[in-house]
Image (cartoon, rainbow, N blue to C red):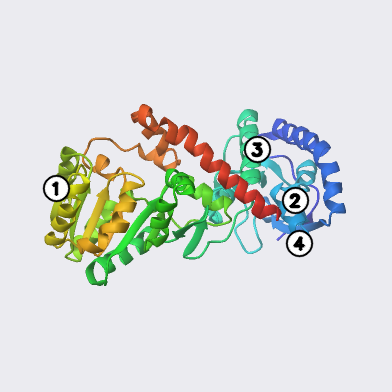
Amino acid sequence: MGPVSSTPDEPSNGGLLVRLFDLALALLALIVVIPAGLVALLLGARWRRTRALGERGRILLLSCFWMPAGRTGRVLERLAATSWPRLYDVVIGNLQLIGPEPGLPGEPPPSERPGLVGPWWFERNAAAASAPAGPERERRRPRRPLSDLKMIAAALFVRLVFGTARAASGETIHVQGLRIDNLDMDTTLQRLGEHAEKGDGSRNVVFINAHCANVAAHDASYRGACDAAEWVFADGSGMKIGARLAGEVLADNVNGTDLFPELCTELSQRGCSIYLLGARPEVVQGVVEYVEREHPGLVIAGHRDGYFTDEEEGQVVAGIAESGADVLLVAMGVPRQELWLHEHLPATGAKLGLAVGGLFDFYSGRLPRAPLFLRDLGLEWTYRLLQEPGRLWRRYLIGNVSFLWRSLRTDWRRTTR
């Protein structure tokens, strides 16, 4: 382990031009940050130096602000004030603007000069999860001014909107006042399977996405049905953003579409049966054919489309009860499906009732799902918008903005109170 360093080695990862770029940008930023930093010091922030590992195990003393307790500290932290002094470390050469994460004592050191931000930073601050220590520090990326500026701008946006990374939340969290059961996919499958096989009474399962949260904000009966459900799961990237802005961390994206094939396997192994209710006749028939083809061990107790009158409702409920199905999947759209299950599930005798939205469209083959890379990026909604722009433009183009605005408003109230 080398001595404490305040003077860096020769610039790496791009040479002199990279060093000059970092120096120029850091000095420009300091013109803005120094007056703001003086204000932060007057408000109670304290300058500190912390130990970290640089390239080849070189010990660095990196600068930071420690925030005062209370509302002032939370606001300063939200403005990224904790990291302002690290621009000084860029100027003296302890850090580069973009690079691997600084190492901690006892960990493998980074292979090159650490960075103020980098891909590791987004794992910690945008994905709301702790980044792995070793592999990310070894990953190198070419330094290009335009891409560097984009990454810095993105980091500022993420920090201002989402704040700092948080520890994992408990099993129950709240997003815009809606209770969310914060379980991962495996735990969800186990609990649903156990209740379908051995549970007493009927239990509803609801999946909440950004559109559902928008509906709940204006429809008290729908919100009541969600609150009364046994399990409420967060569905989609919008809820991940909403949870983060509520100061929570989602354990998983437990959406009904990804859950369905895994649930079919779980129920088949437990000897349970399902009933499919909703959508057009040819669509629900397509789901039946999918289950028979892909999950031949799962018993389909019955199925019917969702186009029935109020006068026929009693007959539909009686038919489900006569089938003896353990699990009822209802695809009638939000909020009708949740309200229907809330009112009628006990009379059907099914132990589980799942409100599954557009799931039948995907597994019947009527609509293809978004490519995996879009789903991984949280952009499946863009693909759905392109599929059905006339029906979905309001939900996504206006609804997503409305959802984000309510989340931001709630978050800033929480941060500044």
Q: Earlier in the sequence, mark 2 or mark 4?
A: 4
Q: Which residue is mark 1?
A: 293
Q: Quadrant of the C terminus?
A: bottom right
> Within 10 Å of the Cα at label 2, are there few (<14), some (14-19), or many (20+) other Cα atoms?
many
Amino acid under label 1? Arg
| Percent coordinates x, y for residue 144 in the rendering | 62, 30
User: Which is nearer the N-term, disc 1 or disc 4?
Assistant: 4
Residue visible at 12% across and 61% down? 322
* Secondary structure at numbered mark 2: helix
The amino acid type, in three-letter code, at marker 4 is Ala
| Secondary element at image label 1 | helix
Residue 164's spot in the image, x, y percent? 63, 52
Measure how far apart labels 2 and 4 are at the Cα level. Answer: 10 Å
Which amino acid does the dot numbered 2 rest on?
Leu
Task: Pick out the residue farthest to the front.
Answer: 311
Name the residue that disc number 2 marks: 76
Residue 172, how many percent across, how many down?
Answer: 48, 64
Q: Residues within 10 Å of mark 4 (few under 14, many from 20)?
A: few
Q: Residue at x 53, y 39 (%)?
A: 402
Q: Which residue is mark 3?
A: 152
**Disc 3 secondary structure class:** helix
Query: Residue at (43%, 53%) from the top-left corner?
Result: 223
- Identify residue for label 4: 69
Q: Amino acid at mark 3?
A: Ile
- Badge 3 or badge 1: first in the primary sequence: 3
